[in-house]
Image (cartoon, grey):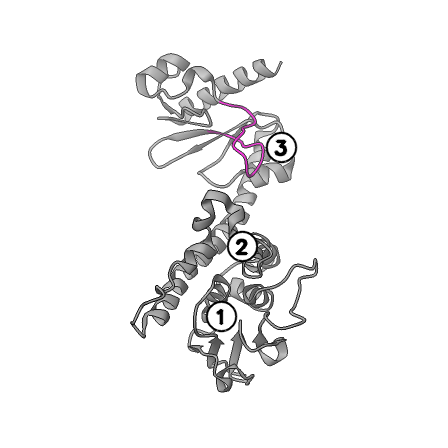
């Protein structure tokens, strides 16, 4: 079967069919994307995938709608949108097409579904209201996608189609970046794991470059680690380790006497030549050399342990 058409509904668009289109246009780049509600388009055929329209969920027939009675539910009872259905059936192939290593496909497929696809499903089905985001409601991804719809009194007959394709372009950038970052985190885990083994019982973890480190630290159960040191383009960085993924509290803060200082003032406060910056919130600092960064980290560890004693 050769897919020649990707069919979704015309009219106002939402995040679910826009992001579904991201996945499908990557897998079927030569297929024509058709936005229509005409019967000849939304009727199943061997040359098409129909989504968010069609009144049925029949993967074998290539129809992935969720608006009908008896609409499909996830195993935990939460409703699918078209994005969830498309990701369920085509997401693994999308990851493979995005050069995700085969051994990481299942893990990333599940993680992307939970963190990216499910929230869009929930909003589209009214299971979660954008208002739950509080003052950030208008800044959520589904909300921003909908701002690209043409205004109600637009007289431009091409405005709706142009808005959809602009939304598609933006959604594609977010999807590709999210997948790339997720894959990078998997690569980082292996590097961080080796660094943890090398650090042993030391409270300081040294990495060869900046990278996501907290997931690997948590996975390894390295609860003794307090600070991470790594090079940047022009200098070296000393950073704390957050207690939780969503919070700002650190396992240990940098010394209060360093807060907000730079240059000579920081050198005098910590006694380390080459110390160059400490954030006022005391979660990150910088130094000109590796030796200076490690010296700052050791001083920070000493103070942190003294405060815990």
Label 1 or label 2, whichever lies nearer to me, is 2
In the picture of the structure, the residue carrying the numbered disc 3 is 222
Q: Is residue 242 magenta?
A: yes
Label 3 or label 1, whichever lies nearer to me, is 1
Direction left: furthest residue: 156
Secondary structure at numbered mark 3: loop
Question: Which of the two residues, 74 or 241, is positioned nearer the viewer here?
Answer: 74
Label 2 or label 3, whichever lies nearer to me, is 2
Instruction: Locate residue 184, reporting x and y percent.
Output: 49, 49
Secondary structure at numbered mark 2: helix
Secondary structure at numbered mark 1: helix
Instruction: Label the magenta part by its dominant secondary structure.
Output: loop
Find out whether the residues at labels 2 and 3 contact each other: C-beta distance under 8 Å: no
Splitting the image into 4 quarters, where does residue 155 fall? bottom left
Splitting the image into 4 quarters, where does residue 86 fall? bottom right
In the picture of the structure, the residue carrying the numbered disc 2 is 116
Q: Is residue 300 magenta?
A: no
Question: Which of the two residues, 205 or 33, is positioned nearer the viewer here?
Answer: 33
């Amino acid at each position: 079967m050769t897919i020649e058409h990707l069919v979704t509904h015309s009219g106002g668009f939402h995040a679910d069919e826009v992001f579904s289109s991201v996945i499908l246009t990557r897998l079927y780049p030569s297929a024509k994307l058709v936005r229509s509600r005409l019967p000849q388009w939304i009727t199943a055929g061997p040359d098409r995938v129909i989504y968010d329209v069609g009144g049925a969920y029949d993967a074998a027939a290539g129809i992935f709608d969720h608006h009908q009675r008896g609409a499909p539910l996830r195993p935990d009872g939460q409703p699918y949108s078209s994005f969830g259905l498309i990701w369920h059936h085509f997401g693994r192939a999308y990851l493979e097409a995005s050069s995700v290593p085969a051994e990481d496909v299942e893990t990333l497929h599940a993680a992307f579904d939970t963190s990216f696809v499910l929230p869009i499903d929930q909003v589209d089905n009214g299971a979660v209201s954008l208002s739950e985001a509080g003052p950030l409601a208008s800044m959520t991804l589904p909300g921003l996608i909908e701002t690209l719809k043409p205004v109600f009194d637009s007289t431009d007959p091409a405005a709706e189609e142009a808005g959809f394709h602009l939304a598609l372009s933006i959604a594609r950038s977010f999807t590709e970046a999210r997948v790339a970052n997720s894959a990078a985190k998997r690569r980082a885990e292996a590097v961080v794991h080796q660094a943890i083994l090398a650090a042993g019982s030391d409270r300081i973890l040294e990495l060869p470059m900046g990278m996501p480190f907290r997931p690997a630290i948590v996975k390894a159960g390295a609860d003794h680690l307090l600070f991470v040191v790594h090079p940047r383009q022009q200098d070296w960085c000393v950073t704390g380790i957050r207690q939780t993924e969503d919070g700002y509290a650190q396992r240990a803060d940098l010394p209060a006497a360093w807060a907000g200082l730079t240059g000579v003032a920081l050198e005098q406060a910590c006694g380390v030549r080459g110390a160059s910056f400490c954030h006022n919130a005391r979660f990150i600092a910088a130094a000109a050399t590796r030796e200076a960064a490690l010296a700052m980290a050791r001083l920070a560890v000493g103070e942190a342990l003294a405060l815990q004693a």
